[in-house]
Image (spheres, rainbow, N blue to C red):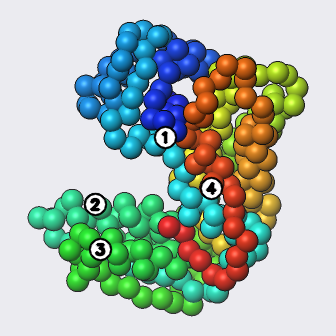
Amino acid sequence: MLVHALVRTDGTVDAGELYTVAGLLGMTDQQVRLCVGRLVAEGRFRQDGRGRRAVLRAVSDATSGALAPDAEHIRHAYRQDDGLAPWDGTWHLFAFAVPEARRTVRDALRETLLHLGAAPVQGGLYVAANPIADLVEARARSLDALDSVTFLTSTDLRLGDLTEPARLAARIWPLDAVAARHERLAAFAEACAESIDGSALSGAERLTLAVELAAGFSDAMTPDPLLPPELLPPHWPGRRARRLTRACWAALSALPPEPGAPASPPRLFQLYDDAFAVPEETGPAGPA
């Protein structure tokens, strides 16, 4: 993950920079060597030179790996934060029954639904608060499993005696765990902003903060179903965490380049700059 995060726009990774940032993150040189060796053996990178003087060259698109932002997911979150994606009161339900012989297809459907913010209600039945049917249908078609999926919507979902939407959401989704991730992200983003304001950072220190901030943001956002504000508890920490993260990232991006720094910046900065540049648009939209 760290190697991918340091890939520059020209497709290279400076090994000296990699070892320095890894050290600041608490990794040993041996861990870095093993990681690089694995990536080279898998054919993802080509290594020119040895040790800290080496240059890694991406063989394929190695754009930031697990830290690469899902731009549409992020933009939808900020639309919700800005009140541009109100809930229309509709629940979106999906049921599927795939035979054991096609277990990989069944698992792929389940992972797609979870990735899109749906949650299981009972065996084979999932519910989402956002309009994701088109995305689910596209995935089911690609898996040749559309005939196995049932799509329906409802405005009167009930679980036992529960009918109030916010209470249903609290029952269906693990909101306490998601909130805790956002709280950790907010705390780190605040500390990151103080580090930027209070000291002159080296290039390696800036990269380290960027990698940590991107990792924290991904850790908080990936499991977040992006429920509409109407379904969330009061004072939901996600909005504050996203605001602080965007401000901290803008401050990192605005720092002048260090003398002698490579002309080609890490792709990670470009990707997050684009993702945080939320377009001003109106109308309903769901996460991608």
Q: Position of residue 252 (x, y in %)?
A: 74, 37
How far apart are the two marked residues, 1 and 2, measured between alpha carbons? 26 Å
Q: Where does label 1 land, which residue?
A: 64
Q: Nearer the viewer, residue 268 or 284?
A: 268
Of labels 1 and 3, the one closer to you: 1
Give the residue drawn at x 34%, y 29%: 45
Give the mark, 4 or 3, whose residue is nearer the N terminus: 3
Give the mark, 3 or 2, whose residue is nearer the N terminus: 2
Q: Where does label 3 land, which residue?
A: 140
> Residue 278 sits in which quadrant?
bottom right
> Residue 121 sits in which quadrant?
bottom left
Looking at numbered disc 3 in the image, what kind of residue is underneath it?
Ala
How far apart are the two marked residues, 4 and 3, measured between alpha carbons? 27 Å
Could you classify mark 2 by the number of other residues whose Cα lies within 10 Å: few (under 14), some (14-19), or many (20 or more)?
Answer: few
Using the image, determine if residue 270 lies above or below residue 31.
below
Looking at numbered disc 2 in the image, what kind of residue is underneath it?
Asp
Number of marks present in the image shown: 4
Mark linked to residue 107: 2
Report if the CB atoms under discs 4 and 2 are less than 8 Å apart: no
Drawn side of residue 93 relative to residue 257, left or right: left
Give the mark, 4 or 2, whose residue is nearer the N terminus: 2
Using the image, determine if residue 51 lies above or below residue 134.
above
Q: Position of residue 13 (x, y in %)?
A: 47, 26
Q: Position of residue 228 (x, y in %)?
A: 66, 72
Q: Secondary structure at mark 2?
A: helix
Q: Secondary structure at mark 4?
A: helix
Q: Where does label 4 land, which residue?
A: 275
